[in-house]
Amino acid sequence: MTADPQASGSPPRRGSRGRRVAALIALALGLAGFVISATGMAAQLLPRRFSAAQQQQIKNWEIAGRWQQLTAGQIFPASVSYQLSALVLQDATPLNLNALRVAIAPQSGCGTGVTTAAAASVLRRDGCQAVLRATYVDATGSYVMTVGVAVLPSPAAARKASQSLAPPRLTAASQSEADRLAAGILVVRYHGTAGAMYDYSRQISASFPAGPYLVMYAAGYADSRPRVPVAADHYSDKEMTSLAVGVAQSVAGTLAAPPASPHCPGTPGC
C-alpha cells in the first residue's frame, strides 16, 4: 500500500512564515528610510528654490557688499572710456575719449569726504557708512574731476540722500558765487599739476543714486586757465560734463550692476 503523499509530508511551520513577513516588513522600512534619507540629502545638495522676494534680497545683499569686496582699482579703473556726442562736435560721428586716473583717496568718513556740513548731515541721517573718492583727468590734461561714492544701507536711503542734496548745477558766475561750494563731493587733490591748486568743484557738481550708493562728482579746468564760468564756453562745458558723467556712470555700473539671479528651478520668474 502506497503512502498518502499529503500524509508523508512534514506539517507547515508557522514560525518560518512569520519570520519571512517580518523580513519583508523590515526590508520595506529600510527602503523607505533610504528614500527619505536620499530625499533629505538631495534637498541639501540640489539648488534651493527662492521666491521673487528672496531673490531680490539676495541681489540687494550682493550689491551692498561690493564696495568691500572689490579693490579700489576695480571700483576706480586706471582708464575709463567716455564719448563726446556728434552734436557737440557738429559732426556725423561721436568722439571716443579716455579719462585717466591720477589719484585715489583713502576711504574717508561721511563727514570728511564732502564739501559742507549740510551734506555730511544728510549722509549721516541716511545711514552713510563711508565715502570713496578718486580723481581723473582727460587725455589732454585740460579738465579734471573727482568722482565719489557714499555707501548707504539701501537703495531707498541713497535716493533720499540724493533728493536732499540735489544741488543746482554750480558755475562760478561771480566771485561771490564761487565762494559758495555745492553740497557734494570734496575733491581729491594730486601733486605736480595745476589741478592741485585750483578748486575745480566751483565749475560743475552733481549726484545721483545707484542701488545703495550715492555717486557724486565735481569737475573743472586743470590747466591754470582763468577762473571763468565753464557755462561761458559751450564746447568746454559739454566736454567737461561728458568726462564727469562718463566716469561717474562707469563707477556706478561697477558697483550697482544687477547680479545673476539665484538658481531656483521651477520658481516662476526665476
Image (cartoon, rainbow, N blue to C red):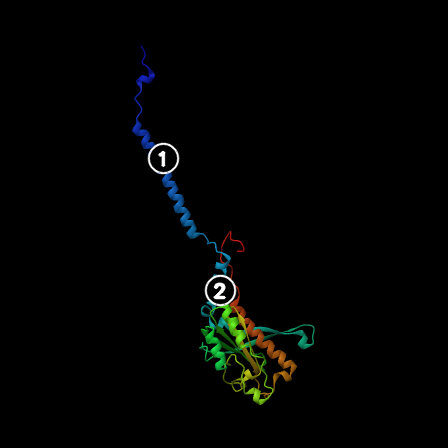
Q: Specify whether residue 245 is in view.
A: yes
Per the rendering, the mark at residue 60 is 2
Q: Residues within 10 Å of mark 2 (few under 14, many from 20)?
A: some
- Percent across and percent down for residue 267 are 51, 53
Rendered location of residue 115, percent (x, y): 50, 82
Q: Residue 171 or 106: which is nearer the viewer?
A: 171
Q: Nearer the viewer, residue 95 or 216?
A: 216
Q: Amino acid at mark 2?
A: Asn
Q: Earlier in the sequence, mark 1 or mark 2?
A: 1
- Spot occupied by residue 209 in the image (x, y as percentages of width and height): 53, 71
The residue labelled by disc 1 is 24
Q: Residues within 10 Å of mark 1 (few under 14, many from 20)?
A: few
Callouts 1 and 2 close, C-beta under 8 Å: no
- The answer to which quarter of the image holds residue 27 is top left
Q: Is residue 28 left or right of residue 169?
A: left
Q: Nearer the viewer, residue 117 or 64?
A: 117
User: Residue type at mark 1?
Assistant: Leu
Is residue 212 among the parts visible in the rendering?
no
